[in-house]
Image (spheres, rainbow, N blue to C red):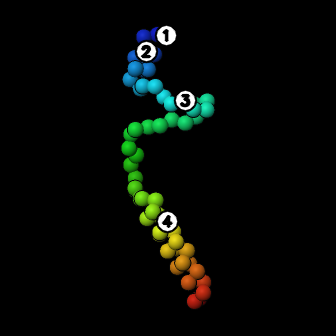
Amino acid sequence: MSKRREKRRRKTGPMPATSAGLLRFFEEESFGIKIKPLVLIILTIIFIIVCILVQFYA
């Protein structure tokens, strides 16, 4: 192995074994809106109920 590859390998650390290397895990935090799953489910249920009520009264 070349020295360049050895340095790169030491920096990144071992990757988990996956099917053909298609899955990678990153520790970096992504930017954007962060919503808890429970809040998202509740908002979805409320949206469905509102849609049903609008159809019923319209």
Q: Is 30 rendered above or below residue 37?
A: above
- Residue 31's x, y, as percent? 38, 49
Determine which of the numbered discs, if any, sits on residue 41 in the image.
Answer: 4
Q: CA distance from mark 1 to mark 2?
A: 7 Å
* Residue placed under numbered mark 2 in the picture: 6
Q: Residues within 10 Å of mark 4 (few under 14, many from 20)?
A: few
Give the camera-side residue of 2 and 24: 24
In-image side of 21 versus 38 (left or right): right
Looking at the rendered structure, the kind of residue marked 3 is: Ala
- Residue 39's x, y, as percent? 43, 65
Badge nearest the viewer, 1 or 4 = 4
Looking at the rendered structure, the kind of residue marked 1 is: Met
Residue 35 placement: quadrant? bottom left
Residue 54 placement: quadrant? bottom right
**In which quadrant will I find the C terminus?**
bottom right
Looking at the rendered structure, the kind of residue marked 2 is: Glu
Q: CA distance from mark 3 to mark 2?
A: 19 Å
Q: Is 8 rendered above or below residue 19?
A: above
The kind of secondary structure element at disc 4 is helix
- Residue at 42 percent across and 25 percent down: it is 13
Determine which of the numbered discs, if any, sits on residue 17 in the image.
Answer: 3
Question: Of callouts 4 and 3, which one flags the residue occurring earlier in the amino acid sequence?
Answer: 3
Q: CA distance from mark 4 to mark 2?
A: 46 Å
Question: Of callouts 1 and 4, which one flags the residue occurring earlier in the amino acid sequence?
Answer: 1
Question: Of callouts 4 and 2, which one flags the residue occurring earlier in the amino acid sequence?
Answer: 2
Q: Is 29 rendered above or below residue 48?
A: above
Q: Is 14 rendered above or below residue 25?
A: above
Q: CA distance from mark 1 to mark 4?
A: 50 Å
* Residue placed under numbered mark 1 in the picture: 1
Q: CA distance from mark 1 to mark 3?
A: 21 Å
